[in-house]
Image (cartoon, rainbow, N blue to C red):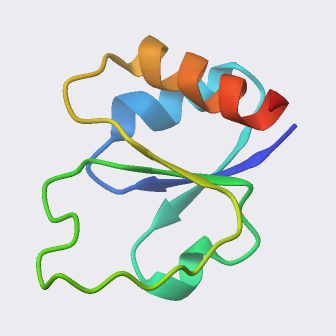
């Protein structure tokens, strides 16, 4: 399946994505997103400095306020489009 980058703090999301058969990469550094089809962020430190540098070509999903299952569904929806 797809390779998904997930922020370290989102362990429940990582578990849900692994259960669905996806390869999960923990995002610790910017370069960890290389090769990912999609990334999931917590949204806590999103664009703090007002700088946006695109590291991946895939989608970035902000998991703030979403359950792990909702994030999994959003990831799978983005991968199909």
Please name the residue shown 46% across and 25% down the image.
71
Please name the residue shown 49% across and 61% down the image.
26
The residue closer to the viewer here, 42 or 27, is 42
Q: Choose top left, top right, bottom left or bottom right for residue 27.
A: bottom left
Q: Position of residue 13 (x, y in %)?
A: 43, 31
Q: Residue furthest right?
A: 1
Tell me: 11 left or right of 81.
Answer: left
Please name the residue shown 13% across and 85% down the image.
49
Q: Quadrant of the N terminus?
A: top right
Total marks placed: 0
Q: Choose top left, top right, bottom left or bottom right for residue 17.
A: top right
Tell me: 66 left or right of 14.
Answer: left
Tell me: 33 left or right of 51.
Answer: right
Tell me: 19 left or right of 50.
Answer: right
Residue 77 vertical placement versus 35 (above, below)? above
Q: Position of residue 11 (x, y in %)?
A: 36, 39
Residue 11 vertical placement versus 20 (above, below)? below
Q: Position of residue 18 (x, y in %)?
A: 65, 31
The residue closer to the viewer here, 9 or 74, is 74
Please name the residue shown 36% across and 81% down the image.
52
């Amino acid at each position: 399946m797809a390779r998904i980058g997930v922020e370290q703090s989102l362990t429940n999301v990582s578990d849900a994505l692994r259960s669905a058969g996806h390869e999960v990469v923990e995002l610790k550094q910017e370069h960890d997103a290389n090769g990912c089809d999609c990334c999931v962020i917590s949204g806590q430190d999103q664009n703090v400095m007002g700088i946006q540098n695109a590291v991946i070509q895939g989608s970035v999903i902000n998991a703030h306020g979403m359950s792990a299952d909702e994030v999994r569904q959003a990831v799978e929806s983005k991968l199909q489009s």
